[in-house]
Amino acid sequence: MRRKEQQITDRNIIDKILSNAEVVRLGFIDKGRPYIVPFNYGYSDNCIYIHCAPEGRKIDLIKENPLVCIEAEQTAEIERYEKACQWGTIYRSVIGWGMAEIITDYQMKRDALDIIMSHYGAGETHNLDYDKRKVDNMSVIKVVITEITGKQSGNWEER
C-alpha cells in the first residue's frame, strides 16, 4: 500500500467495517477479464455470505475459478470546498481475497440466511421462518476470506 499511514491493520476495525457496510462487491475472473457484482450480504467468522439465483454468470464463474476479490466501504462521504482541488473523500474500506463455494446443504443455507438477515437488523423479534421451496431454489455463496486489508482517508478521525 502506497500510503501506509492510511492502512488499517487492526483486525477489529476491519471486522467492524465488514459488519456495518451495506453492500459488498465481489470480483470474479471471467476469461481473463474482471467482473464485479454488488450484493447484500452477511458477515460472520471471517466469511461473507450471499444469496442469489441458482444459476447465472457468477455461479458459472465460481465453478470455473473460486478465487474472488471482495470490497466494502463503511462510508464514503464527499467533502466539498470553495476550490476544486481541496475537495476530498472521507472513507473507510476493505479489500480482500478469498475462496468462494456454493452451499447446497439446506440447513447450512438457512444458517447463512440468518447471518444475512442479522446483518441488516433482523433479530429475535423477526420471523426467520424461511419458505423451504425458496431456500431450495436459491444459491448461497460462502466466501472464506484468506487475505484482507483496510484503508481509511487521512481525515477519518476528524469526522
Image (cartoon, grey):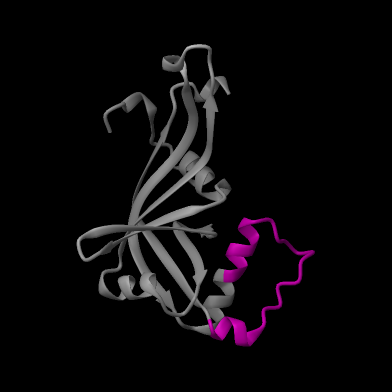
| Quadrant of the image containing the N terminus | top left
Nearer to the camera, 4 or 22: 22
With respect to residue 135, does 142 lie above or below? Answer: above
Left of 58 or right of it: where is 131? right
Left of 15 or right of it: where is 122? right
Residue occupying image coordinates x 58% and y 63%: 116
With respect to residue 56, does 85 lie above or below? Answer: above
Nearer to the camera, 35 or 129: 35
- View extreme (right): residue: 125
Residue occupying image coordinates x 48% and y 21%: 155
**Magenta span of residues:** 113-137
How many numbered badges does the structure rendering display?
0
Res 159 → quadrant: top right
* Residue 136 image position (x, y, % from top left): 55, 86
* Residue 127 image position (x, y, % from top left): 76, 71
- View extreme (left): residue: 32
Query: Is 136 contained in the magenta span?
Result: yes
Residue occupying image coordinates x 44% and y 27%: 153
Left of 142 or right of it: where is 40? right
Residue occupying image coordinates x 49% and y 33%: 91
* Residue 66 image position (x, y, % from top left): 30, 68
* Residue 99 image position (x, y, % from top left): 33, 64
